[in-house]
Image (cartoon, rainbow, N blue to C red):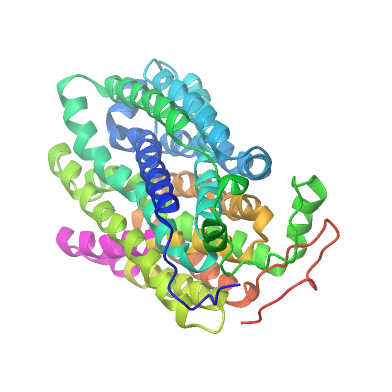
Amino acid sequence: MTDQHLPLIAPPRIRRQQSVALALLVLSGVINYLDRGTLAVANELVRGDLGLTMGQMGVLLSAFSWTYAVCQLPVGVLVDRIGPRWLLGIGLVVWSVSQAAGGFASTFGYFVIARLVLGIGEAPQFPSAARVVGNWFPPASRGTPTGIFNSASPLGIALAPLILSPLIAAFNWRSAFFVTGAAGLVVAIIWLALYRDPVKSRMTTEERAYLESGVDVSAKPPAKVSFAEWRALFSYPATWGMLIGFFGSVYLNWVYLTWLPGYLRTARHMSLTNTGFAAAVPFFCGFLGALVAGWVSDRIASKSASPVGGRRNAMVLAMLGMVVFTVPAAFVESNTIALACISFVIFLANASSACAWSLATIVAPPSRIASLGAIQNFGGFLGGALAPLLTGYIAQGWSFVPALLTGAGIAFVGAMSYLFLVRKPMAEQGPDAGPNALHAST
């Protein structure tokens, strides 16, 4: 077994497959977040057209996240059992059709249903991406590719106002839903045509040795993940630390992701044109944050006594930074300073997301990477579901200041959950394995 601290060089054929897989994950991830961000960009126009209050808009913005969060639990197991190729391909078709259907909305109830289905369709994206990284990269090299596929989320959100605002201005808000829905169907075809999971029986000795570097091959993983084996993950403190911790990270991130354009126009009185540019800047910073975090987490892990400790500590520091920069963002009068602070928050939020998914590939047993990643994401998108809802009602009843401070407090609790509960990786064991089946102390 190769020392985890040595640099790993992928054989040429593996490197080509890694490049194809990551390119497709970024492409599908950008479409994923363009679809999520369409409603945020069209916020005021949809509210005016359908006659919605800010509270109702909060419900509509959060509807996607409820089904997305709930579906994380079964989707993680399905990805581990069936594989990411078909799960993500089917998900792309479902979410693209529901996105296009949102363009036909004429009532609040219909729009809520379309957003609920969107959440179901988008659920396989990130568990599939974590599984792809687990399939094609050895543990010591998973931070950088995780940062790359996570960079698609802020990139998609950054592109949303730049691409969709002119489209909405030229036609109407419905056209944005039709165009992004059609783009998703095209990406579904490309994904199914090009992506394949690795088949080790067809690999050379060198290729197998690369993929098994740092993996305990003496503990043979089960062929299929059973419900009992999935349920056993909840007996580990690390699982709860990741679930609660990601709740805090995603909650604060989604306060900005769903309400930033509306916040800039409502609370800071920016025009639609200026809002499109201003709302894009923080998410381009988030794109850089995801890329940098993946690379940095690999460097930290390579120098740490435990890869878990290194990646966890990077996660905690990023989340504490989110808290620190949110406080001045809530209070300063200058739009420029507020946007600078928000840009730092989004940079760190996406850095923490990349660290979280990278952490899942290290903490989880090899057979349950998607399952643990999906459980963590379930916690995250409970936060993602509550954030736009609570923010809408708090802003309606008081202002955006307490809404932002609430997000900062929740993120702080999440950081402490990672710090104190995520301590050790889980061994590859059978369905009865519990918290004592651990190895590699921090």
User: How many discs mark residues in the rendered view?
Assistant: 0
Residue at (23% x, 66% y) in the render:
332
Placement of 267 over or under 314, stated as above or below: above
* Snapshot quadrant of residue 42: top left
* 71 drawn magenta: no
Which quadrant, please, contains the N terminus? bottom right
Where residue 219 appears, x then y in whole percent? Answer: 75, 64
Where residue 58 appears, x then y in whole percent? Answer: 44, 39
Residue at (57% x, 79% y) in the render:
306
Residue 413 in sight in this render: yes
Q: What stretch is highlighted in magenta?
A: 327-350
Where residue 47 appears, x then y in whole percent? Answer: 34, 29
Residue 116 in sight in this render: no
Q: From the viewer's perspective, is 63 left or right of 179? A: right
Where residue 141 appears, x then y in whole percent? Answer: 46, 65
Q: Please tell me which residue lies in front, 59 or 374.
A: 374
Q: From the viewer's perspective, is 284 left or right of 3? A: left
* Snapshot quadrant of residue 265: top left
* Snapshot quadrant of residue 87: top right
Q: Please tell me which residue lies in front, 93 or 173.
A: 93
Placement of 139 over or under 287, stated as above or below: below
